[in-house]
Image (cartoon, rainbow, N blue to C red):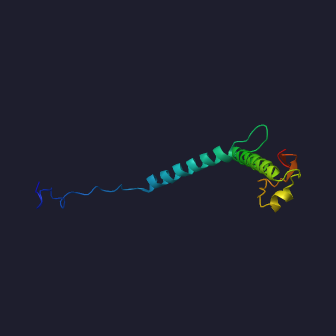
Amino acid sequence: MRLARHGSPDTSRRQRPTPLRNQNGASFATVLVVLLIAVALYYAYFGVRDAATGKSAGVSAIDTSRAVACRSNRQTLERAVVAWSQTHDGETATLAALTADGIRVPSCPEGGTYSLAGNSVRCGTHQ
């Protein structure tokens, strides 16, 4: 083997690896594997149905997250009602009064309407 000027082997004479003669089969197999993985993920998320509700796992997860968001909104609004009641002695809290004082009244993610019953907040959809 001949050394180049700086002591490294001369690579100009080294043979390059030959490409596969027929790569069509390899690329087809790769595409097929990717499609199978995509189909498996699709059915794992949307295809599995809950026996009790008949909804897919993905739809059930979305419904659950909306219910949790609604509960969180109601809890936040209840804390705002308590704080408002401390500064407005003897007045009854209403959603309109809270909004008039600049308190943002959140909305239910599923379109339910909130109502006040004392210091507790009810949702037309979730309670």
Q: Residue at x 61, y 49 (%)?
A: 39
| Image side of residue 5 versus residue 88, left or right | left
Residue 114 place in picture, x, y as percent? 84, 52
Quadrant into which the N terminus falls: bottom left
| Image side of residue 127 versus residue 8, left or right | right
Quadrant into which the C terminus falls: top right
Front position in the image: 109 or 16: 109
Q: Residue at x 75, y 49 (%)?
A: 76
Residue 56 place in picture, x, y as percent? 72, 45
Considering every residue shown, the one lying at the far top of the view is: 51
Above/below status of 6 relative to 123: below
Front position in the image: 63 or 94: 94
Front position in the image: 7 or 25: 7
How many numbered markers are drawn? 0
Figure quadrant of residue 52: top right
Residue 103 place in picture, x, y as percent? 77, 58
Q: Residue at x 30, y 56 (%)?
A: 18
Residue 63 place in picture, x, y as percent? 75, 47
